[in-house]
Each structure stands twice: as structure tokens, then as C-alpha cells.
């Protein structure tokens, strides 16, 4: 299958594309409900089945109500079931994903070339989504999840609103990753994260070279960038992350990593699952790594060695347009500022 465009279609089930494909476009469609086959109902489900899928664009679509089953963690706006970089040059851009997404908002196998930008990811979750995902333990509900070694991934200029991620909003694990960019995103989590919900940190990665995390704003989200040089262990924990129960230290590795000009805000310096605004567990071996001008109202927040930089943390509090200093404002009630900073962070749609 090649050189096809699907545009302006309204579906109460999703779309599945299996086998070799190239230059496929899904533009301006509405999906209310998910594809019932494959590993869970997805708005868009791609599986090369051993063959390449290349140049697939999913743009300007509305995908919502992927509720799955009360006893299952199904339901994703986009699923690419590749592995070991067999899927090439995908784009998931300018889409609205949510509300009522049962599982991960988007999930990818090992992928070579992915742009996911200018999307809006919306909560709330379905009513049957509990802290254990409908009875299953260990469910995450990440906004973007990539399992398996991947190259050239850009997750930028996205708005994530009250998705209540139950582990990480951004999760790349079980492999080595090169040239990964997380830039200019605004993540505003659900206030319920401070009222008993099991929410976690924002980005989490194992081994990364050429990692860029810059100009992001995380509101009501403690976050950690876990960049280490080996795959996560059998318990699903990155080596060196002792707060999660790691039994092995982070080994030296990682190069050309830049974690700078980010803002992390939690009300009154509160902690989520024991994390303060910045919790960096990392190893930086063969190349330069930067931590520069990251901002928090938690003056105790600091990166671990070897990251160094000017003004690692700065005491600063936001001002939302409704006058509050927390993320209880309504959808698109943007905060004012940041004022007095030498940079801006968090894309404002």
C-alpha cells in the first residue's frame, strides 16, 4: 500500500494498517472509539509485520473515547507496533487526543524517525480507569511511550492537560536512544495528583545520547530525566534510580545531553511520590552534558553530578490568569509569564 490519503472521514472505530506501506496520510478525520483488533483498540494502529512502513502521517485528527474494557488497559490514539527501528519516518502532529483515553495516549515500538508535535492531549480519563487501570497492576497511561531502541524522535510543542499520568508523561525505556528531543511542551496535570491519585514524574528515559530537554513547563508534575547507559533491569527500573528500587548503579555513558531552561512547578514545593520538582538520576560519560537555568519554586532542587550550570534552580512562582498559583484553572486558562526570566518555556497554543 502506498500513496494514499484518508481525509474528512468520521468513524466510530479506528484504523488499522498492517504490512508494507509508504506515503500514507490520515488528515482531518474524527475517530470516536477504537480499532477492536490488535493489542487493544487504537485510533490508529500500524504494524509492519516484518516489513517496512515508511512516511506515514497522522495529522489534524480528533481521537477520543478509547475507553477499552473495564478489565483491560486498552485504548491508545496511536499505536506503532514496530521493533528495532523497523518503522520509519512517522508523524503524529496537530491532533487532539482525548478525552477518555483508557491506556497510553500514544505508544510506539522501536522507531527510526518520529515527529510528534503541536498535539493536544486531554483528560479526563474514562470512568472505568482506576489507579490500577481497571484492575490491572502496573499500568502507566503515559502520554507518549516508546519501548525499544529508537533514533531521531522529536516530541515538541505539545499541550498535555490533566491526563493524570500514572507513571511518566513521557517514557522511553528498554533500549538505547539517539537524538531525542523534548522541547517547548506545556504539561498541566490534574490537581487530583495531590489528592490521592497515583501520579508520577514527567520524562523518564534509560540510555540516551544526544538528548535535548529544553524550554518545557511542568505544572503539578514532579519530573526526572533518567539517562543511564544500560537497559532497565528485570524489575523495570533504570539502573541508578535507587528511589524506585534499583539495585545497580548507573554506569558511565550518555553524551551531548542538554537539560536546560525548563520550569517545574508544584504547589508550595509539594512532592509527588517523594519527588521534588527536579530529580535527576543520570550518567554522562563521553561527551558534554548541560544543565542550565532550570527554574523551580523548590530551592532545594538540584541535578546530580556531573550536570552543572548557571542558576540550577531559581525561586519563582507562576501567576495564572484566574489569579491562582496552581493548575486548578480551566482548560486554556494560561498562566501569565514567566516574568523576569531570560527565556520562555511551554508552548502556548
Image (spheres, rainbow, N blue to C red):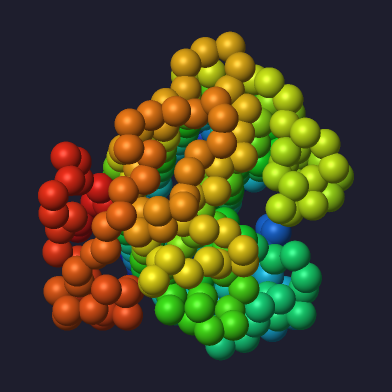
Q: Quadrant of residue 304?
A: top right
**Nearer the observer, 169 or 293:** 293
Residue 282, given in percent of the width and then of the height, sits at 61, 34
**Who's the residue at 56% across and 87% down the image?**
127
Residue 330, given in percent of the width and then of the height, sits at 26, 80
Q: Is residue 345 left or right of residue 223?
A: left
Residue 115 visible in rendering: no
Residue 307 visible in rendering: yes
Relative vertical location of residue 226 with respect to residue 327 in this rendering, above or below: above
Relative vertical location of residue 162 with respect to residue 96 in this rendering, above or below: below
**Nearer the observer, 29 or 267:** 267
Relative vertical location of residue 340 with respect to residue 332 in this rendering, above or below: above
Q: Quadrant of residue 71?
A: bottom right
**Who's the residue at 27% across and 51% down the image?**
346
Q: Is residue 349 left or right of residue 179?
A: left
Residue 60, given in percent of the width and then of the height, sits at 29, 55
Which quadrant would the C terminus be assigned to in this image? bottom left
Hey, which residue is sitting farthest front in the picture?
300
Q: Is residue 270 left or right of residue 36?
A: left
Residue 193, given in percent of the width and then of the height, sits at 51, 75
Q: Quadrant of residue 228?
A: top right
Marks counted in the figure total 0
Amino acid at each position: 500500500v502506498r500513496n494514499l490519503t484518508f481525509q474528512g472521514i468520521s468513524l466510530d472505530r479506528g484504523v488499522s494498517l498492517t504490512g508494507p506501506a509508504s506515503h500514507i496520510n490520515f488528515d482531518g478525520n474524527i475517530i470516536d472509539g477504537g480499532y477492536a483488533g490488535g493489542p487493544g483498540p487504537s485510533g490508529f494502529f500500524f504494524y509492519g509485520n516484518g516489513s517496512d512502513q515508511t512516511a506515514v502521517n497522522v495529522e489534524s485528527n480528533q481521537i477520543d473515547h478509547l475507553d477499552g474494557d473495564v478489565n483491560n488497559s486498552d485504548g491508545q490514539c496511536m499505536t506503532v507496533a514496530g521493533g528495532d527501528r523497523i518503522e520509519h519516518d512517522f508523524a503524529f502532529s496537530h491532533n487532539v487526543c482525548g478525552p477518555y483515553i483508557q491506556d497510553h495516549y500514544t505508544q510506539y515500538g522501536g522507531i527510526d524517525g518520529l515527529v510528534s508535535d503541536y498535539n493536544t492531549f486531554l483528560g479526563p480519563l474514562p470512568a472505568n480507569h482506576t489507579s490500577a487501570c481497571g484492575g490491572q497492576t502496573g499500568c502507566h497511561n503515559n502520554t507518549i511511550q516508546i519501548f525499544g531502541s529508537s533514533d531521531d524522535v522529536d516530541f515538541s510543542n505539545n499541550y498535555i492537560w490533566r491526563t493524570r499520568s500514572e507513571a511518566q508523561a513521557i517514557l522511553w525505556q528498554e533500549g538505547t536512544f539517539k537524538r531525542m528531543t523534548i522541547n517547548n511542551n506545556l504539561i498541566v496535570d490534574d490537581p487530583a495528583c495531590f489528592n490521592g491519585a497515583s501520579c508520577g514524574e514527567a520524562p523518564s528515559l534509560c540510555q540516551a545520547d544526544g538528548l535535548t530537554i529544553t524550554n518545557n513547563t511542568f505544572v503539578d508534575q514532579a519530573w526526572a530525566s533518567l539517562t543511564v547507559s544500560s537497559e532497565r533491569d528485570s524489575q523495570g527500573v533504570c539502573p541508578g534510580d535507587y528511589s524506585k528500587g534499583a539495585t545497580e548503579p548507573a554506569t558511565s555513558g550518555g553524551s551531548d545531553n542538554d537539560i536546560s531552561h525548563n520550569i517545574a512547578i508544584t504547589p508550595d514545593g509539594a512532592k509527588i511520590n517523594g519527588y521534588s520538582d527536579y530529580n535527576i538520576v543520570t550518567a554522562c560519560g563521553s561527551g558534554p552534558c548541560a544543565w542550565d537555568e532550570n527554574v523551580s519554586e523548590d530551592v532545594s532542587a538540584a541535578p546530580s553530578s556531573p550536570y552543572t550550570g548557571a542558576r540550577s534552580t531559581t525561586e519563582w512562582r507562576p501567576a495564572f490568569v484566574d489569579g491562582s498559583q496552581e493548575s486548578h484553572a480551566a482548560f486554556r486558562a494560561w498562566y501569565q509569564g514567566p516574568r523576569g526570566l531570560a527565556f520562555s518555556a511551554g508552548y502556548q497554543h
